[in-house]
Amino acid sequence: MDPTTSMYVAQGIHGLAYGMVLFLIASGLNVIFGMMGILNLAHGAFFMLSAYFCYQVLSITESFWIALLLAPIFTAFFGILLEKFFLRKVHVMGHMGELILTVGIAAIIMAVVKIFWGTESLHIKIPPILAGMVSIGGLDYPSYRLFMIGLAVVVMVIMSLLLYKTRLGKIVRAAVSDRDMVNALGINIPVVFMVVFGVGTWMAGVAGVAIAPILTVFPGLADQVGMDAFIVVVTGGFGSLLGAFIVSIIFGLLSSYGIQFLSQLAPVLIVGFMAIVLAIRPHGLFGVKE
Amino acid sequence: MINKIKHWILWVALIGILAIFPKVFGAYYTNLFVTFAVFAVLSVSLNLLLGYTGLLSFGHAMFFGAGGYGTALALKHIEGLSLLPAFGIGVLSAIVLAMILCPFVVRVSGTAFAMLHLAFAQLMYVLALKLRGITGGEDGIGNFPIPAFTIPGVVSFNMKGAPESFYYFAIIVLGISVWLMWFFTKTPFGQIQVGIRDNFKRIDYLGFKVPHTKAVIYIVAAAFAGVAGSVYALFHNLVSADGSLGALVSFAPIINTMIGGVGSFFGPIWGTAIFQIIEELVLRFTDRVELVIGVTLVLVIMFAPMGFSGLITMLKQRLFSASSHKLEKI
């Protein structure tokens, strides 16, 4: 393969890897915001919190795999606490109440993280098995990024199977479209919503751990990646996993090729794409009009 | 009659306090007050959309930023421009931006409206960060000349290095803005606004054009956000992407409005004041402002969801019903 083509391919896989991680966070947010209709601005903060948990678990156990298992679960636990004791009470006030509450929670998480871990960037090592390069068609590529893509695909497949092939998924989809009716049928809606919220934050947690070795862990993660995830959900359409998937990939590729060709203006491409999509279809690419 | 006299006395007292404020409290609190006034005007202009028309915007910062960048760029590139035209250019650029966006945004409402604004505001923010040649990137535009306030042949006040005269300029401009917005909500047109919020189908049925009305309100709200942004840029002699276009600048007025009380005209002003006071007090003891503000937001939304104005109304009602109980007993 000649150098130019291999460079394009490498950039493509780079973009794919970022797009996949973006999709992991965004699909968590999509479940919470798109399907349950809870405007959760603390999602990025949970994502960051999980990266810090990963650092902590890693420094105690020295095993990335235990961190990958435990950190998202801790994160999901805090997410469930948030849903049970706070969000549920303000849900009746609509988006405004949720906005204020989750902005407050995000600020608290940010402050607490700064108290415990300080403000400087913490480095996390890539686990030794994945530290090497993989050769694909004569092209050397860091295997950790391929692992990230694989992880995202696995989580996505599990999520879609859960949502569209199981009884639980059916209940969740029914509860989203008519909460009162499902409640009247004898299904404990608050518990269902609590579990769904937990799953959403768990996915943010997985993404936080996956991205930690690449981006280093610092408090700015929440704003930087959280905003991107929010944009993906909005552009893809609320509640549409497919939309979030396609838009994440487009964003990943736009940012990696954009950096190559336009360098400075790459972020403009992403938000410009969002602005154009929303100006034509206000409910997102695959969104359904309320 | 007595009410009217009371009214006038209150007005005179308010103007008197504002007039002697810098003399009594010194430079530090004067600057603090100007910051408060700028964000109060921004919050009230947002409340024209949010509270009066029921349109939640996640991107009000772009008009604030347009005002700031408009004024800063005009002063930087046009030699010998005087203060009022520069200020006017800032407000005009916010209005022009609103007019460009109007056709897209008036068709939608609810979540889609909020998200569309998020998109456009992010676009503005990123453009301001990346178009270094025009906007100065992360550094923003600073140290542009600030001309004297002149009415030819009448007066001339030096503005640069004279915080007191700038204070009077800012307070007068912002005060007039608040008064104009108050007046605006009291006109029949302002009443249609509330009608659109409560039942837009009925307003449509009555023969009013809903999208056109929304467009006018939108432009008015944008213009006053531009006023606030322009004054803010002049005040700091600096306009930067994070300081006037960032997502926080969009969220702050929403939060101020919610904390103060979304249904009332003066709610956002209360909210801005409350936040400014909290920040000021907290900074005395600790630099963990984030934590305190986070806890405040959570507490308010959990225990006083109607905001400060709602709290006062509730207390009033309680006192009122308590006294009426007494009357019944007697």
Image (cartoon, coloured by chain):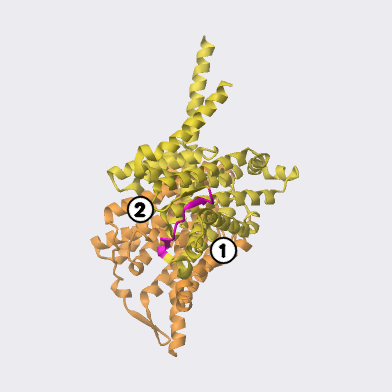
Chain colours: A orange, B yellow
Residue A19 on image: x %, y %: 46, 69
Specify which label sits upstream in the sequence, 2 or 1: 2
Residue A27 on image: x %, y %: 48, 61
Amino acid under disc 2: Met
Residue pointed to by mark 1: A275
Residue A115 on image: x %, y %: 28, 52
Residue B155 on image: x %, y %: 50, 47
Mark 1: few/some/many CA within 10 Å (<14, 14-19, 20+): many
Q: Contact (CB < 8 A) between labels 2 and 1?
A: no
Residue pointed to by mark 2: A110
| In the image, residue B225 lies in the stretch drawn in magenta | no
The image quarter in which residue B237 lies = bottom left
The local secondary structure at tag 2 comes to helix
Pair 2/1: label in front: 1
Mark 2: few/some/many CA within 10 Å (<14, 14-19, 20+): many
Amino acid under disc 1: Ala
To which chain does the residue with label 2 belong?
A
Q: Nearer the viewer, residue A248 or B17?
A: B17
Residue A240's label in the rendered image is none
State the extent of the magenta-drawn residues as a range: B138-153
Q: In percent of the image, x 30 and y 48: which residue is there? A: B287
